[in-house]
Image: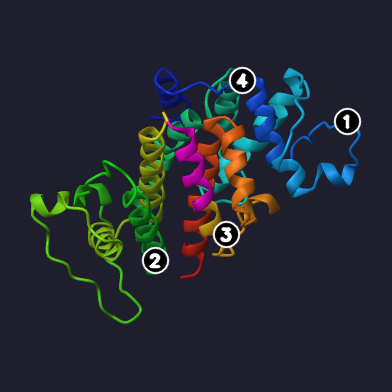
Amino acid sequence: MNPVKTLLILMLVSPTFSGCKAVNHALEFLGFIAPVKKDHSPEEIHDEKSLAGQRGDPVVSAETLSKQNSEILSEMFRVVFNQDEVEDKTDYSGLLQSLNQGASLEGIYRGIIAGSRYRALESKSQAASPNELKAFAEEMAEIQGIMRSPTEFSIVDSKKAPEITFPDGNIPVIASPSSQEVKKKLDKSARVQEIVRIFIGASSFTLKRTLGEEALRKFDEDKSDPGVVAHWYAKLVVRLATSKVDFGLELRNSADFDFHFKFAQKIAIDRVKWEVLNRYHRYLNAAGHSR
């Protein structure tokens, strides 16, 4: 199923993009529009601390909003498909129209990863590198360690591809746990090893999709408590900032916990979700490039 058709289904169950103010806040963060402030200099407007504080709410036309949506969607395509330019113009145009009509970024993202093009990449791409598998396992273990009901993965979830060889020539061998053991809370090291055991041989596209889906489940668990979401988001951003991966903007690369905590409290949750998904995809893309 192509991403546009998939999105039409997902839009029925996905939250809609919330409000013009939330959209404008997100776009200010991305740098597509400048926040409007009275009696402030241009230098202050672009200062990180200023952005973390009071924000203006400029009115944008439908044409301007479409242009801004185009920039966000272009980033999503490039990051998710790990490409320099948007290659599938037809799907892109259809999804942009959906976004302009009020589709959520989560719905757009789910439409893309459920589409035939992405699934073809999952099944046809070679196995992820050891570096990417390790990065994936560590991030998955990090999320699952703070979830109330983490997903219990099986070999089926990995869509096994050709086996890979680790740098030292050894592949971790871990006995399959019993159903009782799976339900016990494992420490992070054990979780990492178990995730490696299950997903060894999976393509990088499978790893990125699986990590993204688990992150969205984490959001669902905490949707009734914005403070918990903001705290988790800020900690994640600060931790990934130490990786020195470029997440697309200077503000995203900042390790300022307070800034990101306040951002997550001000912005629409749909936008915060894309900030997390964007970072995970970029982080695993970077790990894959360091084969």
Of mark 2 and mark 4, the one earlier in the sequence is 4
> Which secondary structure, mark 4?
loop
Mark 1 = which residue?
A: 38
**Residue 5 visible here:** yes
Of mark 3 and mark 1, the one earlier in the sequence is 1
Of mark 4 and mark 3, the one earlier in the sequence is 4
Mark 4 = which residue?
A: 19
In the image, 65: left or right of 89? right
Mark 2 = which residue?
A: 129
Which of discs 3 and 2 lies nearer the camera? The answer is 3
Q: Position of residue 226 (x, y in %)?
A: 48, 33
Give amino acid for label 2: Ser
Whether tag 3 and tag 2 are in contact, CB under 8 A, the answer is no
Q: In the picture, which quadrant includes the N terminus? A: top left
Q: Position of residue 231 (x, y in %)?
A: 49, 45
- In front here: 160 or 99? 99
Magenta segment, prevailing SS (helix, strand or loop): helix
Of mark 4 and mark 1, the one earlier in the sequence is 4
Give the Cα distance between marks 2 and 1. 51 Å
Give the Cα distance between marks 3 and 2. 22 Å
Give amino acid for label 1: Lys
Mark 3 = which residue?
A: 241
Give the Cα distance between marks 4 and 1. 23 Å
How many tags in the picture? 4
Q: How is the image coloured?
A: rainbow
Give amino acid for label 4: Gly
Q: Is residue 24 above or below residue 199?
A: above
Task: Give the residues in magenta.
Answer: 225-235
Residue 197 belongs to magenta span:
no
